Structures are given as C-alpha cells and as structure tokens.
Amino acid sequence: MTGFRFLHLADLHLETSFGGRASTRERLRRAALKALENAVDYAIEHELHAVLAAGDLYDDPILSLQTEFAIQRQLQRLDEARIWFLAVCGNHDPGGPRHRSTRLGLETDAAGARRERVHVFRERDPQPVTLTDAAGRPVAVVVGAGHPSDAESENLAANFPALATELPLVGLLHTHVESTPAASQHDRYAPSGQRDFERDEYSYWALGHIHTRQCAVPGRPVHYPGNLQGRNPRETGEKGGLVVECVAGAAAEPTFVCFAPVRWERVRMDRLAEFATPHALVARLAEAIAELRTRSDELIVRIELAGETPLAPQLRRSADREALAEELETATGVLEVQLRDAGVMRPIDRDALRGSPSAIARALDLIERARGDDALLDELAPAELASAVDPADRSAYLRELLADLPEELIERSFETDSR
C-alpha cells in the first residue's frame, strides 16, 4: 500500500479586516501571512507530498500586493520542493470567472510558466487529480469541488464519486456540515449532512468553512482543521493545521500542529468582591494571564468582568478600563488586553434595603405585590405597554418584564456618575 502524507489547512482568510487597535490590526495581518509561511516550512521540512487548502484562502477580493506576493512566494517554495498545493474555492474566494480567484493565477509563476503541482478546484462538479511523489510515482487521488459563487446553495458533497483506486482517496471541500458543533455560527453555504460522508472508499475528508477544529462526523475520517490564525475573541486557542498520513482502504487520523504566531484567549472573572483596590485586581488578572502562557506565541486576551465589586464605578468607565488594560499589558507583556464590563455591580445588602423605610423599598414591595395581583399589574403598566400584546397573554408578558426589574432598580438607585 502506498502512503500519502499531507497537510490539511482551511480558512486562511488572508487580508482580513481585523478589529482592535491599529498596531494590533497590523500585527494580526502579518501573523496570518506568517502562519502560512510556518505551514509551508513544516511541509518542506517534513517532506510531505502535498498541502491541501479547503477554501477561503483570502477574506477580501481586493488583495494588497504584499499579500499577493506572499501567496505566490509560498507556492513557489512548495513547487521548488516538488510538493503539491491543491485548493478548493470557498464562499470568500469563489472560482467563477468574474471573481478574484481566477485572476489571481495561482497555477502560474511570476514568469507565466505553469506550476505542474498546483491545482485549484473552481467548479462545483467534483474532479479527481492524481498526485505523485517527488520521483513521479502516484501516491494519492484527491477529489475536490469548488464554489463558483460567493453564496453556493447546492450540496456539493452529495456529488462526490465512489472511485475504484488502489491509491488513498481524499475528498477536499468547503462545506457547512449542518450537524457539527459551531455550525450555527457560520453561513449555510454548500450545506451537507453526515450521511454524505459515510463512504468507506475515502480515507480522509479535508473540509473547510467551520472555524472550530473538530471531527465533523463521529467515527469517520471527516475533519475541520479550524482556521489558520485566530481573527477575533471568539476564535480562541491554538490555531494551525492537521497533518495526515493515510493509506488506501483505511481511515486516517490527523495530528494537529500549531502554526499561528498570535493566540486569542478569553477570561471571565465574576468573583471580584475580594479586590478592594485596582492594584489588587491587576495583580490577580496578571496571574490569570500568566496561566494562559503555555507556548511562546503572542497573546491577545479579552477579560470579561462581572459580579459585585467596590470598583464597579471605575470598571464601568471606558477610560478607566483602558488604563487597567494598559497596566496589564505592561505587567504581562501580552500584545493587547481588552477589558469588558460583563455586568459589574456595587456591593449592596439587598435584604437590609428591602426592610428599610425608603422609597426604593416601597418600589420593590410594589413590584413584588404586582407579580401576584393582575389588577395591580394592569394598573401599574403604561397603557401603550399593556395594549401591545394580546389580552390573553398580557399578564404573563408583564410579569416577564418584571423579572429583572428589582435588580435593575437597586443598581440604578445606587449608581454614581460612572459611565
């Protein structure tokens, strides 16, 4: 049996319009290009047969010359090392004649000569390509299908053929496998289901589109590698590609390799009462960031603060949060810290408040009585609010509105000029 060793990448999204500070945006743009370079370094160093890119090579159809040159430079390196590069077009880099993918000309070098080991699948009809090793011996058949438009609605996976071959057979596709975790966070392009991949003749399915690394079909060699470089606070953790070694007639099991030089992480801290001073809070947050440092990569950390704290007035002010973030960056050396108010509150003895002779205590008592008295509920509700729903549902609707009102009333009553 002939073995086939390759690197599975997806969703590079080069030229992404990143958020955050200008310096961070520039660092992330360079990090995405460096992640691609790291992946090519790995393929060359380990003498792999191929690099397979499962769609969305770039994010925006208007590419800078720097990005174009970077892509071409890495393809030239692979070509010179006699390593294949196969890519399918996705919804961000569709392959139709009016789209950027065709004009980019990945299959030719700077002099216009054709690269024999570069192939881009632009059509929705699956096509097989036989791959050879550096000596010209056949090592695998890769079947790929691309998105001709940026809103492909057809199930492309359903059309993949059952080929009879003694070589490892690999499917390459950008698809929305509907039953996978995190699928709801992505647009439904080229939708497919688990049953489309229940084919024993395929040793591996190299998929793209879902940015969470995972096996898309339990018990089957159907995998998303996740995107190559995290782009925002939702895309946390190490990012990279999957190294795969497969033989004909057997399911392949991939191994993750990290290529991204910048890592996003999120920290939620909701036990803030013990920190009486900003310095104490910064010290604890610095410890939390230190716990994230498992590698030498750069970090961007989003910290979400919630719960009762005497520091609530400061933590609600954006200028004070920025000052705390800058202090944390200095203390930890991370690329950027983003502090977010996820519901900080002043410490208040709510039981004592309800029993006090105050206007707020009267208001809370009134809310509590209204929850069990429909007549009082109708009397208190503004006419335009009470008439906004069907009379049969009005009481339930008004009680639902009251659910969070006591806490909001307490908080607003003790709110200082903190915004």
Image (cartoon, rainbow, N blue to C red):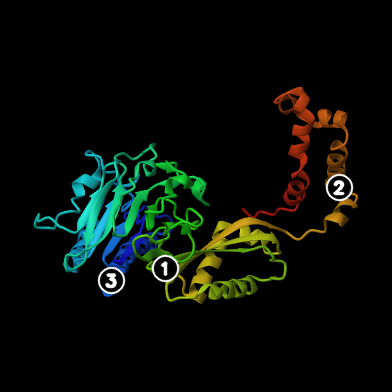
Q: Nearer the viewer, residue 55 or 398?
A: 55
Q: Nearer the viewer, residue 152 or 353?
A: 152
Residue that carries the numbered disc 2 in the rendered image: 361
Query: What is the CA distance from the residue labelled 1 to the residue labelled 2?
Result: 61 Å
Residue 262 shows in this picture: yes
- Residue at the spot 21% in from the left edge and 39% down from the top edge: 97
| Of labels 1 and 2, the one closer to you | 1
Q: For the residues carrying marks 3 and 1, which lies nearer the camera in this image?
A: 1
Q: Quadrant of residue 53?
A: bottom left
Residue 251: x %, y % from top left: 41, 61
- Dot 2, how many residues are within 10 Å of its Cα: few (below 14), some (14-19), or many (20+)? some
- Where residue 94 appears, x then y in whole percent? 29, 44
Which residue lies under the disc numbered 3? 41
The type of residue carrying mark 1 is Thr
Which dot marks residue 255? Answer: 1
- Identify the secondary structure beneath mark 3: helix
